[in-house]
Image (cartoon, helix red, strand yellow):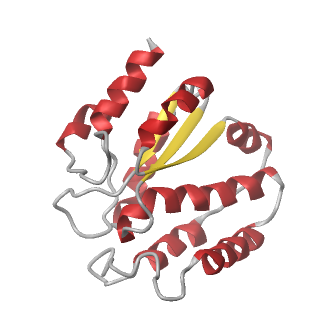
Amino acid sequence: MLNNLDKISSDIDLFLENCDSLLILGIGNDIRGDDGLGPYIINQLSILKDYILNNSDLNDINREINKNELETQDNEFEFFDNVIDINTGNTPLVEGLDSYINELNVDVNESLIERMNKTFLINGGSVPENFTGLIRKIDPSHIILIDASLMKRQAGEINIVNKDNIADISISTHSMSLAYLIKYLQMEKE
């Protein structure tokens, strides 16, 4: 839900405290409605990263995101049609994500540009294990996985799940469990 954004932000800040390089892996199948959230977020972050690195302003970013969504939408199928609400106010998911974008107060400075140069974005689709070689090559100090999952909560609720608790999350659309993927990447790191 949108009302836990402060907690999510502080959890992410704490996780990234000693981050040298960050890899964000979006997981999901964009033809399966809300399961495509991971790839959708990676797409939007890619646009944001591109504009930050090219010193564009937020109005340009919002225009590009809106333009990109119009170009990628199928006329008969809207990406999040089957997501009825993101919170009790029946806000469609796209409107909820737009509210995050409108809350952005991006100060493009040297520090942000340096962090963006050390941030890698991968659309892992529904087979994220196909990208383990690339992930090993990038060798990030921190990895964030973005995926839609069944958590017995309200539709669209956003939660941070620690790697130690990932086995408790129900995900059935991927060929490899995320818990196993994380263990595999950790073994490769050692």
Q: Can the viewer see residue 61 in this picture?
A: yes
Front residue of 3/101: it is: 101
Residue 162: x %, y % from top left: 31, 37
Horizontally, residue 64 falls left or right of residue 130, namely right
Residue 6: x %, y % from top left: 42, 56
Horizontally, residue 3 falls left or right of residue 140, namely left
Rendered image quadrant of residue 70: bottom right
**Residue at 35% across / 60% down in the picture?**
4
The correct choice, above or below, for 76 with respect to 102 in the image is: below
**Residue at 29% across / 31% down in the picture?**
180
The correct choice, above or below, for 87 with respect to 45 in the image is: below
Rendered image quadrant of residue 32: bottom left
Rendered image quadrant of residue 129: top left
Front residue of 42/33: it is: 33
Residue 62: x %, y % from top left: 68, 73
Q: Can the viewer see residue 14 in this picture?
A: no
Q: Quadrant of the C terminus?
A: top left
Q: Quadrant of the N terminus?
A: bottom left
Front residue of 173/98: it is: 173
Total of numbered circles in the picture?
0
| Furthest-top residue in this view | 190
Horizontally, residue 99 falls left or right of residue 45, namely left
The correct choice, above or below, for 86 with respect to 190 in the image is: below
**Residue at 71% across / 44% down in the picture?**
112
**Residue at 32% across / 39% down in the picture?**
178
Residue 21: x %, y % from top left: 61, 30
